[in-house]
Amino acid sequence: MARREAIVEVRRVTALTVLVWGGLAASVWAQQPPPDGTWTADAIVAESRSVSDPTLGAAQGVAIRDGKIYAYGDVHTVKPRVGVMREFGMDLVPTGRVLWLRRDGAPLIIHPTGLTWDKRWGTFLGDTIKSPEDPRRTKAKIYRLDWERAWSDGNLDHAVLDTIDDDAAINGCRPTFVNVAGRTLLATADYGSIHPEIRLYDPETLLATRRSSSPGVVVATILSGPYNQNLYWDSERKRLTCVQNVIEGRGWRLDILDLAKGVADGRADGPGVRVQTYTFSPHNELEGYWPVDGEKAILVTSSPRDNLVVGTIRTTPPAISPATSAASETP
């Protein structure tokens, strides 16, 4: 009996050691850039200018609404870690308005991913964090917000209208309203490289059940490219842009799809679905994209400097972008 108890104790200590080391490794890994790689680039951001805003933390996305630019990020350097959104003029000069994604003084949305809105359904904002049950997986939630109240208060104390568990997600969420065949749907996509999907949700059923895995919520899926960080919907051309990394945690790629054809085929690689792909040379982490006008666009990275880039996207002859010892931040 004593020998058996000793074996059990050794196993318990070993498991605890593995757990502690795994936690430490994950903590260290979060502070280190992911392994780099080499790819072929075929696009640049021409006539670009960069703005550094470290107050965004690791910036996660951008949107233009009512003549203002809204950039949001994960302020991982503060304790406790919390998400933030900041308002800018169209010249990327801060207006001074800040929305902390806290409720009753505690962080609510930590890693904001995907800001979208619709006249009928209102404003939605995603949150993607590591699952407390399994740190190897991510957990996704979608919040419906009172936009005006949030900005009036500067927090989410009285602005959360609905909380949705996006448990159909494989690897995070990035909600974006789209329109397919005259029907308004909520699109989202996975980050990982294992069977990543674009999913289209019925907003009415989603709000009624508050779970994306509920029957009738998912109305279509499209097998997509990997490493989706964000989505942008072009309502005029009916095209969905997947804002992607080239490899895990690194690179800039925009994958533009004809959404109706993607729904019909079920694959981004299907005939006529992929309209255009732009792959850029930088090796830092692209997080967001939003066109400013017919020519220029804003691209957002998680880097501590030059994290907001404005310029014109242009194709170039294919050229090798080699792995770097440090993340290149030049577009």
Image (cartoon, rainbow, N blue to C red):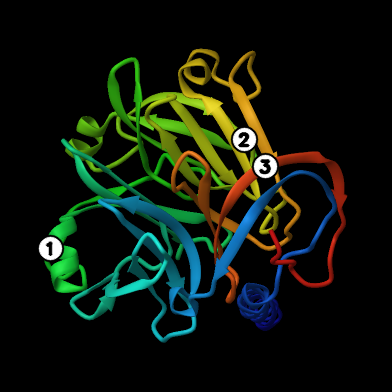
> Callout 2, which amino acid?
His
Query: Which residue is identified by label 1?
Result: 149
Residue 273: percent from left, percent from top: 58, 20
Q: Secondary structure at mark 3?
A: strand
Pointer 1 and pointer 3: residues touching (CB < 8 Å)? no
Q: CA distance from mark 2 to mark 3?
A: 30 Å
Select label 2 or label 3 by which is in front: 3
Q: Which comes before the other along the chain, label 2 or label 3?
A: 2
What crowding class fits label 1: few (fewer than 14 Cα within 10 Å), some (14-19), or many (20 or more)? some
The image shows residue 225, relative to residue 103, as above or below, that is: above
Q: Which comes before the other along the chain, label 1 or label 3?
A: 1
What crowding class fits label 3: few (fewer than 14 Cα within 10 Å), some (14-19), or many (20 or more)? few
Q: CA distance from mark 1 to mark 3?
A: 40 Å
Residue sticking out furthest to the front: 47
Q: Secondary structure at mark 1?
A: helix
Residue 325: percent from left, percent from top: 84, 71
Q: Residue visible at 39% across and 71% down? A: 93
Query: Which residue is identified by label 2?
Result: 195
Residue 136: percent from left, percent from top: 58, 59
Q: CA distance from mark 1 to mark 2?
A: 38 Å
Q: How many marks?
A: 3
Q: Residue visible at 78% across and 72% down? A: 326
Query: Which residue is identified by label 3?
Result: 314
The image shows residue 62, relative to residue 325, as above or below, that is: above
Q: Secondary structure at mark 2?
A: loop
